[in-house]
Amino acid sequence: MTSHERTSPCQKQRQHLDKRYADLSSSHLLLPINLPPLYQKKAHEEATALGHWNGPLCRMVLPCEEKLESTRGIEVADFVDDRNNMPGGPGDCVIQKYQDRVLFLMTEKCFGHCMFCFRQDVLEEKHRKLRGDTLKDKIERLITHVAENASIQEVIISGGDPLTCSMDHLEFIINEILSRTAIRNIRIHSRALVYQPGVITEELATILKKNNIRLVHHIAHPYEICDKVRVAAQLLESTGVAQYNQFTLLRGINDHHEVLLQLMDKLDSMNIRNLSVFFPDPVLFSSTFRLNFSRIFDIVSRFNWNSPSWANAIRFCQDSVHGKVRVEDLVEYIPEKGYALFKREDKLIKVPDLPKKLDIPGEISTLLWKG
């Protein structure tokens, strides 16, 4: 037996969990395991170092035991109710939740599938191709909707991951938006930087810079940032592409203010501005990532007290069918009632809490196992 085999975590356990999840994803229409090679290597290195598969990177992309259990508390398929915000009805490629901007679901494909994905229900539906729209159909739908709504000032290209598409398709969509509408603000949301940094090329950077496209990454843990990620981010920076980041607060992954501080420091060193930290949506099979609101508020407080002033501008938010609300929008939280009540303009938003007894914090020695 080699030293590598002696230190590797149990492969039989991994295979057993993956098989159980495959059955679960089939019966409950969840996204299947999809692990990019670079991230697979990182996850295996982490599991080898820890001796188990419950480290932060592993939990992001591989099912853990808790993920396979029944849902906890009040959870629904689509908490933010994307379908209700689709002007063309279920399966539409356009989502409008705010008066001044729309979300354009360019593709249902991703470089990898995040276990905590809050849009699994809608994406799985698209994987089954209920509408079967071509890219040309989608862009015509977007152009028509924007033309009918003069208040729209920004298009957010999302999915899936837009950077899974060819550069020709991406440039075609950008040119169509800019040439056929009055839109001048476009941003792209992507996990490519950490899942497949090799797609960040000079050609892509040039397209983004030429059209003043803002690129929003979704980096959720400092260990997602490696040399390959830094090189790709540097290419974007040297070309002049505006880079941002936003991510979700996740139990067992980054649920400690020290992890958040380390992530902010690394992002700042790459000149990537973090915009928001989201609380996880109470969607089906998400309880393994959710936190009790009492602990969420404590983490936010500790982060704010221990972070430098440039990081204090970060928004801590909860998304909903009516849009995002911040911690400052909290109206009522009595733990015994089992929910937190927020207010956005004149709308009250009730978010179910995770029972405190189920909120087992991630251990800092595991969350930051490299030291």
Image (cartoon, helix red, strand yellow):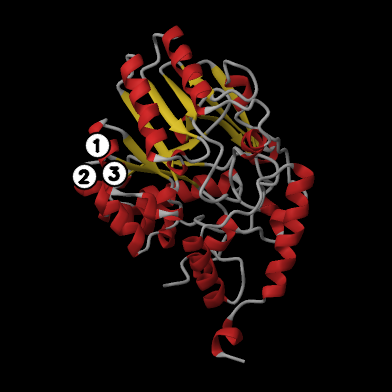
Q: Are marks 1 and 3 in contact (CB under 8 Å)?
A: no
Which residue in the protein does label 1 denote?
A: 209
- Identify whether 242 is placed above or below 24: above
- State how far apart marks 1 and 3 are (Cα): 10 Å
- State how far apart marks 2 and 3 are (Cα): 10 Å
The residue type indicated by label 3 comes to: Glu
Q: Earlier in the sequence, mark 2 or mark 3?
A: 3
Q: Earlier in the sequence, mark 1 or mark 2?
A: 1
Q: Nearer the viewer, residue 202 or 70?
A: 202
In the rendered structure, the answer to whether residue 12 lies left or right of residue 239 reads right
Q: Nearer the viewer, residue 133 or 268?
A: 133
| Number of other residues with Cα within 10 Å of mark 1, as a class: few under 14, some 14 to 19, many 20 or more | some
Q: Residue at x 57, y 54 (%)?
A: 251
Helix, strand or loop at label 1? It is helix
| Residue 217: image location, x then y, percent | 39, 45
- State how far apart marks 1 and 2 are (Cα): 7 Å
Q: Looking at the rendered structure, which numbered label has been put on residue 239?
A: 2
The residue type indicated by label 2 comes to: Thr
Locate residue 11: give its quadrant: bottom right
Q: Which quarter of the figure is the C terminus placed in?
A: bottom left
Q: Which quarter of the figure is the N terminus placed in?
A: bottom right
In the rendered structure, the answer to whether residue 205 lies left or right of residue 357 reads left
Q: Residue at x 28, y 51 (%)?
A: 308
The residue type indicated by label 1 comes to: Lys
Q: Are marks 1 and 2 in contact (CB under 8 Å)?
A: yes
- Identify whether 370 is placed above or below 213: below
